[in-house]
Amino acid sequence: MIEHLDLTVVWAFVIAFAIFAYIVMDGFDLGIGILFPTLRPGEERNTAMNSVAPVWDGNETWLVLGGGGLFAAFPLAYAIILPALYAPIIAMLLGLIFRGVAFEFRWRDPGHRAFWDIAFTGGSVVAALSQGIALGALLQGIRVEGRAYAGGWWDWLSPFSLLVGLGLVCGYALLGATWLVMRTHGPLHDKARSLALWLGAATVAAIGAVSAATPFLKGQYWERWFAMPGVLLTAQVPLLVALAAYGFFRLLKGGADRAPFLIALGLFLLSFVGLGISIFPDVVPGRVTIWEAASPRSSQIFMLVGASVLIPVILAYTAYSYWVFRGKVDSEGYH
């Protein structure tokens, strides 16, 4: 059976799944860091930290899997994309490191907790902004000559990449707010619900702005979204986004706790589908396809054997940890 599989497409979906899993798993705790300045020092901040403390450290597993999978399955794409995006990727990694250190030290060094709170927020904002800028820079195009990056150090910085970066910051903050709605109670719960309303509007506006600008970046984007008969299918994506946004605000205002978080994840999924429509089957948009960038078939088979074991194990222990630490939380922990 494996002889008839297009392993290049399989690996493209494996890496896409890993990236989306990272967004789902790490987005809300980055969002809590982004929202940290809006929370009162003491009980509110401690409760917010306790809500993610059991699960946050394992979320970067998917980031490692996505990056490592790109290197192993699509080495040419890795060799082109990394030099083009060195600055935002390094900034993202430094932000994640700062956030992780601050997460631990704010408990163990209470005398400097205010400093660690600032570091936690700063690391979260930098990581989220850098991820969005990197995505925007990839979408706007990377200059390639032969099989190498041919652009400059600052090519990643543009109004469009900054728009995507700010949009992702809003989106992660929305996930953080809806996570707190789902996991907390009392004044923090009410504050998170109020924040989620504003952040939901900002996120939907950002999705609309990025979606409106993307087709004008490259002719192929316009064709994939608006050429007949494909437009009959692609038009369903913005329609679903509008329906999801309507459901989000209706349920959030109606007092639902869990549904707003799930719908916020749905908005990210629809945005991810839109990204796939824009670039697939390219891995470097307009320049390199997944087949041109792929490693040899023998390497793909070897890695797929390991991934088929590793990914279910990761999913199993992740699901178990979320199941164990389900329910509401306060400054003392889960109940």
Image: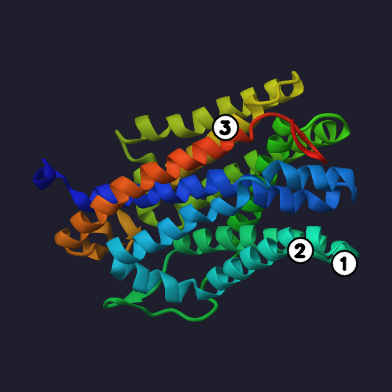
Which quarter of the rendering shows the N terminus? top left
Would you name the residue on which mark 2 appears?
Answer: 105
Q: Is residue 188 above or below residue 30?
A: above
Considering depth in this image, is 198 or 299 the residue closer to the camera? 299
- Decide if residue 329 is in sight here: yes
Where residue 21 appears, x then y in whole percent?
Answer: 48, 45
Q: What residue type is labelled 1?
A: His
Q: What element carries label 3?
A: helix
Residue 136: x and y, percent? Answer: 52, 59
Check contact, mark 2 vs mark 1: CB within 8 A.
Answer: yes
Q: Where residue 301 appears, x then y in whole percent?
A: 19, 55
Tag 2: residue type? Phe
Q: Which of marks 3 and 1 is nearer the N terminus?
A: 1
Q: In which quadrant of the rendered view does residue 71 lie?
A: bottom left
Structural crowding at the residue carrying mark 1, measured as other residues with C-alpha within 10 Å and reported as few (<14), some (14–19) or many (≥20): few
Q: Which residue is drawn at 62% across and 50% down?
A: 56
- The residue positioned 65% from the left and 66% from the top of the image is 95
Q: How many marks?
A: 3
Say whether marks 3 and 2 touch (CB < 8 Å).
no
Left/right placement of residue 265 relative to residue 330 reads left
Going 63% across and 39% down the picture, which residue do you hit?
A: 204
- Pointer 3: what residue? 323
Q: Indicate the secondary structure of the residue bearing disc 1.
A: helix
User: Within 10 angstroms of label 3, few (less than 14), some, or many (20 or more) residues?
Assistant: few
| On-image quarter of the C terminus | top right
Q: Residues within 10 Å of mark 2 (few under 14, many from 20)?
A: some
Q: Residue at x 75, y 59 (%)?
A: 121
Can you identify the residue that label 1 sits on? 112
Mark 2 → mark 1, Cα distance in angstroms: 9 Å
Q: Earlier in the sequence, mark 3 or mark 2?
A: 2
